[in-house]
Structures are given as C-alpha cells and as structure tokens.
Image (spheres, rainbow, N blue to C red):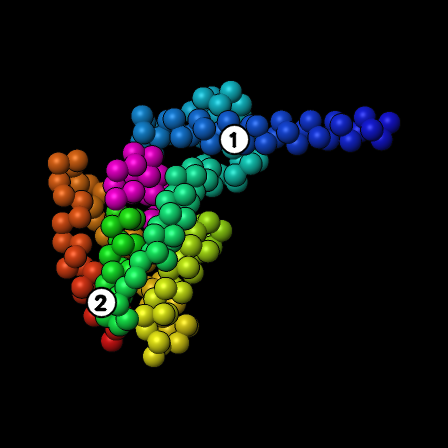
Amino acid sequence: MATRQTSSRGRSRADGNKTRQDLINAADRLLPKLGLAATTSRKIAAEAGTTVASVNYHFGSKDGLITEVVANHMVPVMQQMATDIEALTPSPGRDGVVQVLTEYSRTMLGKCMTDPILREAMGVLFSNPELATQWRANNISPYLERVIDVLVDQLEDRSYREVRWRFNLFVDCVSGQIVKRMGFSPEQDMFKGIDEFVTFMTDAFMA
C-alpha cells in the first residue's frame, strides 16, 4: 500500500511539473503573436491544453507566469554578461567603471530590444515595482552581485555597500532606458545616446 501511495504521489508531482512547463511554453509561443494584453490566462491555458485554474495554481496569476517566461529568456543572458564583465581587464577608477557600465547597458538593451518575447513580457515587471523587486531577487541577483564585485575592485576607496546601492540605482536607470526605447522601430538605433547616458551615470556613480 505504501509503495502504491508513493508511486501515486510521484506521478502527481511529475504531472504537475509537466503542466507547469506546458503553461510556460504556451505563453512563450503566444506572447510574440498576440502581445501582452491579448495573451490572457484563458488563451494560455487553452494553448497548453489545461485550465485557467492551473495558471493560478502554479503561478498565482498571469503576471506570475509571465515573469517565469522572462526569467527563461533573461537568466542565461545575465549569466553570460557577468562572465564577460569578469573577463574584462578594466583600468582602475573611472575608465574601468565606464567599461563595466557600458557592457551592462549594451547587453541589457540589446537583449530586451531584439527578443520579441522580452519586448512584450518585460512590461509586466516595469509596471509592477514590487513584482520586479521579487523577480530580481529570485532570478538575477547573483549575477548582479558578480558585477558589483568587479566594480568594487575598480573603486578601492568605496565600501562594498556604497558601490552596491549606486549600481542598483544604475540598474533601475537602465530599466528606464529600456522602457523609453520599447517604442523604437527595428530601423532605429537602439543604442543611440547610450554612451552619453553611461558617461552621465558614471559621473553620478563617481560623485
């Protein structure tokens, strides 16, 4: 009897995991076709062959599901970005900070502006600061901390805590740049003005 119950629980867990992944895959397919507003929980569930209740059960809401989709697309980019920044050999001081902040800005803009899923889905995070804070903590904080470690090496006269809050402010400003550029057409230069932006932010960073 115990073996049968254990087997039943195992199948139930596997079925639940499959349903969860099916919903993520369904949202991933629908977002670039329909856009964020038209990609409803009902349509996602129908695409996944399940019910709206499953969306709420596994993710709490449509927004919770969309943040999972964002994570699937963004986390590998953040991993590579942190590795690339760690591989830099920046000069100490201001020039090194410019190199690090430029690499971060261009990576984030490049990915968010060219990935059709992210162009649609990032709106969920930008419109909900509380959800965005939770998403950052759960998904990309380790990679941001790696970037902060590199910046600390460039700014030996600053404490880790000071560098950390300044970089987190910079990350928020980059998010603002992404929102500003979401309306750009493919023909427009997504990086236009970004060097000036980084120069301005570096001056604030170093103040």
Residue 22 as seen in the image, left or right of residue 158: right
Name the spot of residue 58 as percent of width and height, x first: 56, 36
Q: Which mark is residue 180?
A: none
Residue 117 as seen in the image, left or right of residue 3: left
> Is residue 173 visible to the viewer in this orientation of the structure?
no
Looking at the picture, does residue 95 appear above or below residue 3? below
Q: Closest to the observer: 152 or 130?
A: 152
Q: Amino acid at mark 1?
A: Gln
Name the spot of residue 83 as percent of width and height, x first: 38, 52
Marks 1 and 2, how far apart at CA: 44 Å
Residue 17 as seen in the image, left or right of residue 191: right
Q: Which mark is residue 21?
A: 1
Q: At numbered mark 2, what does the secondary structure look like: helix, strand or loop?
A: helix
Asked if residue 123 lies in the magenta stretch, the reply is yes
Residue 114 as seen in the image, left or right of residue 135: left
Q: Earlier in the sequence, mark 1 or mark 2?
A: 1
Residue at 13 percent across and 49 percent down: it is 192
Q: Amino acid at mark 2?
A: Asp
Q: Closest to the observer: 130 or 89?
A: 89
Q: Closest to the observer: 47 or 110?
A: 110
Closer to viewer: mark 1 or mark 2: 2
Around disc 1, counting alpha carbons within 10 Å, would you say few (fewer than 14), some (14 to 19), or many (20 or more)? some
Name the spot of residue 85 as percent of width and height, x first: 33, 56
Q: How many marks?
A: 2
Residue at 19 percent across and 41 percent down: it is 183
Q: Which mark is residue 95?
A: 2
Q: Split into 4 quadrants, where in the image is the C terminus? A: bottom left
The span picked out in magenta is: 110-128
Residue at 78 percent across and 31 percent down: it is 6
Predominant secondary structure in magenta? helix
